Amino acid sequence: MTGGDPRRVREGAIPGAGVLGMWVFLATLTVLFLASIVGYLVVRLKASAWPPPGMPRLPAGLWLATVVLLAGSVTIHRALRAIRLGERAGSTRWLQTTLALAFVFLFVQSWNWWGLIRLHLTAASNLYAFTFFMLTGLHAAHVIGGIALLVIVLVRSLRGRYGSDHHGGVTYAAMYWHFLDAIWLVLFAVMVVFA
């Protein structure tokens, strides 16, 4: 192959291969989260009282965290839509907004955790606390991974590495962020319904 943009060769040599790889990766993460949810449900359904007497209810800040995470899904979708239309500057701005929302989500989750820790409720306190910190902590760890991905994609975007016909990184970041949203909605629903 002569001429052409070498970035396009690296990112799109086999059309769809990156997207397929991302789907396989997300499927493996789905198994991890499903196993965690099943573990939570086993503990929850075997408990005689849930939450145990004297335990606080779920932090109200979880609702705010949910709104922030969903807003991030909207902004990453806008970034993908913009780059597909060849709007590089718009895509970059939406990526920056998504990254900011990811940090806000982690801040709100930290605030939720700290609120429980101030009440002397930690993962070592009992199974109720352990399951809460395990589910939300597992998700937060994957949000941190999403932040790393967003930083890489944003830097590449700022360098003009994406265009309407080559935007694999933005596509993968959007897939991952939508996955995090879907998983969070399931986790949150399980914690609320089975509380």
Image (tube, rainbow, N blue to C red):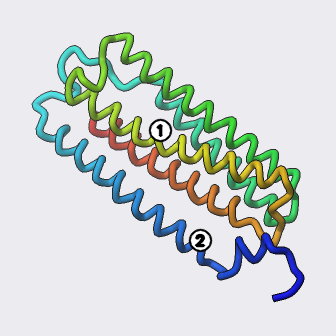
| x and y, in percent, of residue 82 in the image | 81, 58
- Asked whether, in this view, residue 25 is left or right of residue 153, the answer is left
Q: Note whether 59 is above or below 89 in the view shown.
A: above
Q: Note whether 60 is above or below 11 in the view shown.
A: above
Q: Note whether 28 is above or below 64 in the view shown.
A: below
Tell me which residue sits at (13%, 34%) in the image: 47
Tell me which residue sits at (51%, 55%) in the image: 179
Q: Name the amino acid type tagged 1.
A: Ala
Element at badge 2?
helix
Tell me which residue sits at (42%, 23%) in the image: 113
Q: Name the amino acid type tagged 2.
A: Val
Q: Residues within 10 Å of mark 1 (few under 14, many from 20)?
A: many
| x and y, in percent, of residue 23 in the image | 50, 68
| x and y, in percent, of residue 80 in the image | 73, 59
Mark pair 1, 2: CA separation: 24 Å
Q: Give the residue at mark 2.
A: 19
Tell me which residue sits at (68%, 41%) in the image: 99
